[in-house]
Image: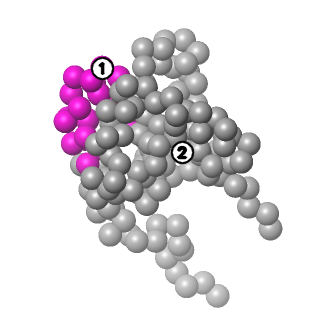
Amino acid sequence: MYIKKLFNKTEYASKRKNLRSKLTKSEVLLWNRLRGKQLNQKFRRQHGVGPYVIDFYCPDLQLAIEIDGLSHETGDVANNDLVRQSFLESQGITVLRFNTLEVFTELDRVVENIYQTTEQLQAVRREDPHPDLPLSGGG
């Protein structure tokens, strides 16, 4: 049986590399607080999931963090964000969204929100360490 690759598809490699080299100011601010396991979790920047590139992703907890600029508030971009979020959630990924203004003016609160979410996701994992495995042994 063939399993379709979901993460970091080769055809989007140059797009991810380009986005990593051109982080927005808000992404740089947040990345400086996420990198190096400062929140006790490894985060990746500009990580591919299916056809999408997520701003920041914690693979251990399946947590995506998106920083939305003003263009994300209206029209097609807002609709595309809803489609993207639905896709990510259908893959079992939790999505946190912040706008650039929040990152610039309330960075500590944003980081605390991310930290609290990682703690909650870890607690769920401790309660059910293998959520995708069947509960019975089967035959």
The residue shown at (59%, 33%) is: 18
> Looking at the image, which is closer to me, 47 or 29?
29
Considering the numbered disc 1 on the image, is that residue within a helix, a strand or a loop?
Answer: helix
Query: x and y percent of residue 64 in the render?
Result: 44, 44
Q: Residue 87 lies in what quarter of the image?
A: top right
Residue at mark 2: 47
Query: Residue 104, percent across and down?
Result: 27, 24
The answer to which of marks 2 and 1 sits earlier in the sequence is 2
Q: Is residue 86 visible?
A: no
Say which amino acid is labelled 2: His
Q: Which mark is residue 126?
A: none
Looking at the rendering, the stretch of residues picked out in magenta corresponds to: 96-115
Say whether residue 76 is left or right of residue 10. left
Residue at horizontal 36 percent and vertical 65 percent from the top:
125
Q: Amino acid at mark 1?
A: Leu
Residue at coordinates 70% horizontally, 55% vertically from top-left?
A: 5
Q: Quadrant of residue 30?
A: top left
Q: Are marks 2 and 1 in contact (CB under 8 Å)?
A: no
Which residue is under mark 1?
Answer: 101
